[in-house]
Amino acid sequence: MYAVIKTGGKQYVVEPGQVLKVEKLNLPEGSSVEFEALMVRDDNGVKVGEEAKGVKVKATVVRHGKGKKIIVFKYKAKKHYQRKYGHRQHFTELQINEIVS
């Protein structure tokens, strides 16, 4: 059984027991969170849209952190313009507990 959830402007395919990194959520570590399922696939088949309404995905916040640093380098040829800076994206790691119909 798996489901598709939406958080942080992105969609994720999740199944019970999976650990995944999503955009930072303002929740303390150890707290639980529920997501509305956009699509569900189980033994009975696939449910999408209105059929999947009411299906919840329960998850637990494992930890918060920062991703790997990426370097952003801006450059204009022959104009002596260079800018270099780094960025580390904040994330929340979730443990998917169950998909409840």
Image (cartoon, helix red, strand yellow):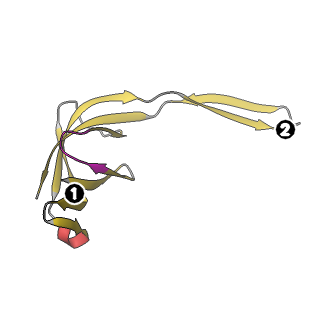
Query: Where is mark 1, residue-wise?
Result: 36
> Of the residues shown, which amino acid type is indicated by label 2?
Ala
For the view shown, which residue lies furthest in the left direction?
101
Q: Secondary structure at mark 1?
A: strand
Report the side of 66 relative to 13 (left or right): right
**Total numbered labels placed on residues in the image:** 2
Q: Residue at x 35, y 38 (%)?
A: 24
Task: Give percent across and percent down for residue 90.
Answer: 41, 33
Location of residue 37 with respect to 90 vertically, above or below: below
Res 20 seen here? yes
Provide the major secondary structure of the magenta segment.
loop
Which span is picked out in magenta? 13-18
Q: CA distance from mark 1 to mark 2?
A: 49 Å
**In front here: 39 or 26?**
39
Q: Which residue is mark 2?
A: 77
Q: Position of residue 69 (x, y in %)?
A: 52, 27
